[in-house]
Each structure stands twice: as C-alpha cells, then as structure tokens.
Image (cartoon, grey):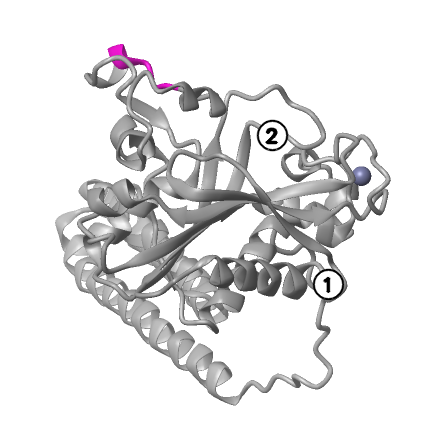
Amino acid sequence: MLKLNTMEEKLNKIKTDYFLNINQAKTLKELDELFLALFGKNGVITLLPKEFGKLPMEELQKIGPLFNQTKHELDNAIENRRQAVREESYAKLTTEKYDLGTAEIKPRHGHLHPTTQFIQETVDLFEKLGFQQFDAPQIDTDEYNFGLLNIPEGHPARDLWDTLYIDPQKTGYSPGELLLRTHTSNAQVRIMRDFTPPIRMMSIGRCYRYENLDARHEHTFEQFELVYIDKGVSMTNLQYLSEYFLQNTVGKDIKVRLRPKYYPFVEPGVGIDGLCIFCHGQGCKVCGGTGWLEVAGAGMIHPTVLKNGGINPEIYSGIAWGPGVGRIMMLKYGFDDIRELLKGDLKFLEKF
Ligand SMILES: [Zn+2]
C-alpha cells in the first residue's frame, strides 16, 4: 500500500525541482519546455493522478487538494516567469546602446556588370537631351522586327540579319512568325504608334543573332536605339548625336565618321565608325584591318516606316540610330574581344 507521506514527498519534490528550473529560465522557449514536462501528454503532473488509485480513500482526500494546489502554483509560476522574461527582453531592447562609431564597416564586394553600368551612363546622357526610355519585347513578331521596318518577307536585305526563330511547334505561331529580335529597331513602329511627334525616345536592351562569333560579333548583345522625330530633323542632327554620344562616352578626342551604308528602314543610311583605338587607324584584328570600328547603324527613317507608324512623312522626318553597346564599350575601355562581356571571367570584370 502506497503511503500518503510518500506521495506527499513526491509532490513536494516535483514542486521544489520545477520551481527552481522555472525561476532560472531565461527564455520563453525554456518555459514552454518546462510547461510541457509538467502538463504535456506525458507530463509528470498529468501522469501523477494515475498513482492515486493505490491510495486509501482517506489519504486520497488529503492528497487531492494538495495536488490541485501544487498544480495551480506551478502553472502560476510559469506564467509569472513568462511575463518577467518578456519584460526583461523589452528592457534590454530599450536600454541597450550600440556604438556606431566603433562598428566595423566592411568594404563592399562586387559591382554592377560593366554593361549595366555603361547602359545607365548612356541613359543619363540622353535624358539630358530630353530622350525617354521605351521598352520593346525581346521575343517579337516578324512584323515588328522586319515587316513594318520596310523589310518584307523574301526581301534580300533579311540576309543582313542572321535570325534565330522560335520553334513554331512550341508556340502555336506560324513558322517564321516569332523570333528573337535581331535589333532594338523593333521598338521603332511601336514608339511611333504610341506617341505623337515631336518624339525623342530611346530603347536599350538585349538582341540576338545567329552569328559566326569573333572578336567583334557575339550572338547575344545589347543595342541602343534612338528615335528622334520632328519637323525639320536632318542628317545634321544625326552627325551631332553621334559625336555627342561617342565624345561623352569614349573620349573627347575620338574620331567619328559617317559612311554611306544601306539599311532598308532608313534613307539615306549610314554606318557610324569610331577610329580604332587599338591600331589608331593602321588596321588590326579587332577592326578587321579597316582601321575603323563600326559602332552604329543609322539614318533618316524611311518614309514607308514613318507611314507604318502612322506619321505623315510629308510633315515630319526622323532619325533612327542603333549603336551596339559592346562595340562602344570596347572603344571606351580598350578591351579587344566583345565575347569577354558574357564570359563571366572575374579577372576581366574586376577591372571595371
Ligand atoms: Zn584596329
């Protein structure tokens, strides 16, 4: 037969041990664990009444109230300690002081990709002249990339752009209808349809071509498109914008030349060349032996393209101007292979 004093001792021992632990608990998590150890499914307080059945009725009448009281006291003790822990941590938060003067400031590692930096500088440069940014899709239709730009299907000029087409079986479009844009000029007609002259817009972004790769050609590259449409816009503006751009990015002493060149969406069309900084005009592998590096295609927007954009070519004229970002970066920073930009070689990138 279990003795009353044995049960009483047991209860007292639980009380003493747990009171000590509760009052020493420093965190709410510790208190939660103590609560479970007492009142959880297998907690000592939960299980204890199972032993009461072994007590005679007379003794049970004495141990019952004692048990209830102990249970109540432990429960209260946990709740009070919880409150105290909360108040302590709050007091710590409000009184703790940090000395920012002695805090170690670690140097930042890494920086934006040089192409991103260059694009931001270019955007700033042309915002000063009142140009606004416009975004056109990188996956686009043949119509916006070619058709509306006066390059209808079957036109031999399409050979100028080695185009990557999207698999028609995966898109539901007709074969040849959907492509990766070959130039940012796919923004041109969209800009004309969205805005009325005077228009000063720029569009910078990724373009894709199925290229034979070499020091000047990359399959994935950034292009920068300017569209400037107003009454009386002429080749003089084009000359000015080319010099403004190259002198502010590459350097004041960069030599720029406009060379007649055919593009179907401009008339007249020009290639804009910067004097090769690697050979100073002597001819090298970077410039393909010509002494000049072509940095942009440009010209007066073809009247047909203006009409396609809903603009009357009898009243307005416009410039379209599309330098390759990588080519100009080569001139500005003096690296001799455009493929460096996408390699992800940290030794190259940390120079910027
Ligand atoms: Zn050269």
Q: Main secondary structure of the magenta part?
A: loop
Q: Which residue is rendered at x = 73% and y = 42% of the image?
A: 292
- Compared to 38, does 241 lie above or below? below
Query: Which residue is at the front of the view, 307 or 286?
Result: 307
Query: Which residue is at the front of the view, 27 or 278?
Result: 278
- Please, what secondary structure does the residue beneath circle 1 have? loop
Front of the two marks 1 and 2: 1
Q: Which residue lies furthest to the bottom in this view?
A: 95
Q: Is residue 62 visible?
A: yes
Q: In which quarter of the image is the N terminus?
A: top left
Residue numbers of the magenta segment: 165-169
Q: Which residue is rendered at x = 38% and y = 73% of the image?
A: 81
**Quadrant housing residue 336:** top right
Among numbered discs 1 and 2, the one appearing first in the sequence: 2
- Compared to 43, does 35 lie above or below? below
Ligand 1 appears in which quadrant? top right
- Please, what secondary structure does the residue beneath circle 2 have? loop
Query: Which residue is at the front of the view, 300 or 82?
Result: 300
Q: In which quarter of the image is the C terminus?
A: bottom right
Counting from the top left corner in percent of width and height, residue 97 is at 59, 87
Q: Residue furthest front?
A: 314
Mark 1 to mark 2 CA distance (whole Å):
24 Å
**Quadrant housing residue 170:** top left
Q: Which residue is rendered at x = 42% and y = 74% of the image?
A: 85
Magenta span contains residue 65: no
Counting from the top left corner in percent of width and height, residue 226 is at 43, 54
- Compared to 82, does 292 lie above or below? above
Q: The residue under label 2 is which amino acid type? A: Glu
- Label 2, on which residue? 218
Q: Can residue 9 be seen in this view?
A: no
Q: Which residue is rendered at x = 56% and y = 21% of the image?
A: 211
- Label 1, on which residue? 251
